[in-house]
Image (spheres, helix red, strand yellow):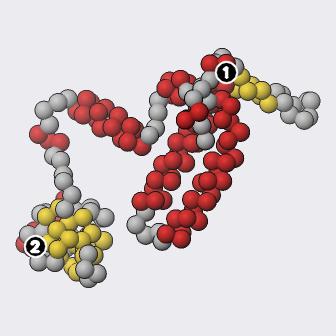
Amino acid sequence: MKIESLRIGMKVLHPQYGSGSVKAISEFAAEIQFDDGNKRTVAPEPSGMEPLEPHAAVSGLNMPLTQFVNETVAAAIAKLGLQKPDSVVDQLGVRWHGGKVVLHPADATLQTKEVPLEVFFHKIVMVRNNLRVLEQKINAHEKLSDGEKVEMQQYITKSYGSLTTFNVLFKDKEEQF
């Protein structure tokens, strides 16, 4: 394995020391934190070290790059649970289609603000989706203790609770907060 192919955080497999994670990279060697708890400086090429994660070479790809990128991005969006703005409006209750949110300031000399309900709803759904992604990232975080995860989850739960006011906008109950 060439030093140029290493990245910080990359998982690697050393024939003698086992699996580990790249912590630092210099010109000829890399500092690896091995799963046995030891940190070692290793020259990857002569040691026979290999990537532990599967890698893909795009150079031999037999499809247009644009198609490859589009399919990859679409898969990432689907995995994260993010949605296109058009599909968000489908979740909006029919009675709200074409509606608007009107904000009247207490000071009558100030201008009223009107926002199309579809735009407002899209923003609410994006907050929900971002909270879901944050929740997944917290749960999967390897350095947070269970107590820290629970503490952070409480803030997310409180945010969901605050957003229940907007449940009236959703067409289907299973989409609500």
Task: Please tell me which residue is depicted at 48% across the width and 71% down the height of the picture.
Answer: 145
Identify whether 24 is placed above or below 173: below
Query: Residue 58, image x and y in percent?
Result: 17, 42
Task: Please tell me which residue is depicted at 35% across the width and 34% down the height of the picture.
Answer: 74
Disc 1 and disc 2 in contact, CB within 8 angstroms: no
| Secondary structure of the residue carrying numbered label 1 | helix
With 86 as the anchor, is 30 left or right in this view? left
Query: Residue 137, image x and y in percent?
Result: 45, 56
Name the residue carrying label 2: 15
For label 1, the crowd category at 10 Å Cα-Cα, with few meaning under 14, some 14 to 19 and many 20 or more, is some
Residue farthest toward the right in the current orientation of the protein: 108
Query: Residue 17, image x and y in percent?
Result: 16, 78
Identify whether 3 is placed above or below 17: above
Q: Nearer the viewer, residue 130 or 61?
A: 130
Q: Amino acid at mark 1?
A: Trp
With 133 as the anchor, is 165 left or right in this view? right
User: Which quadrant: the N terminus?
Assistant: bottom left
| Secondary structure of the residue carrying numbered label 2 | loop
- CA separation in Å, label 1 and label 2: 62 Å
Q: Earlier in the sequence, mark 1 or mark 2?
A: 2
Identify whether 117 is placed above or below 4: above
Query: Residue 11, image x and y in percent?
Result: 24, 64
Residue 26 appearing in the image: no
Residue 35 appearing in the image: yes
Q: Nearer the viewer, residue 91 or 71?
A: 91
Q: Which numbered disc covers residue 96?
A: 1
Task: Please tell me which residue is depicted at 60% across the width and 37% down the height of the picture.
Answer: 176
For label 2, the crowd category at 10 Å Cα-Cα, with few meaning under 14, some 14 to 19 and many 20 or more, is few
Q: Nearer the viewer, residue 4 or 14?
A: 14
Q: Amino acid at mark 2?
A: Pro
Task: Please tell me which residue is depicted at 55% across the width and 64% down the height of the picture.
Answer: 150
Q: Which numbered disc covers residue 62?
A: none
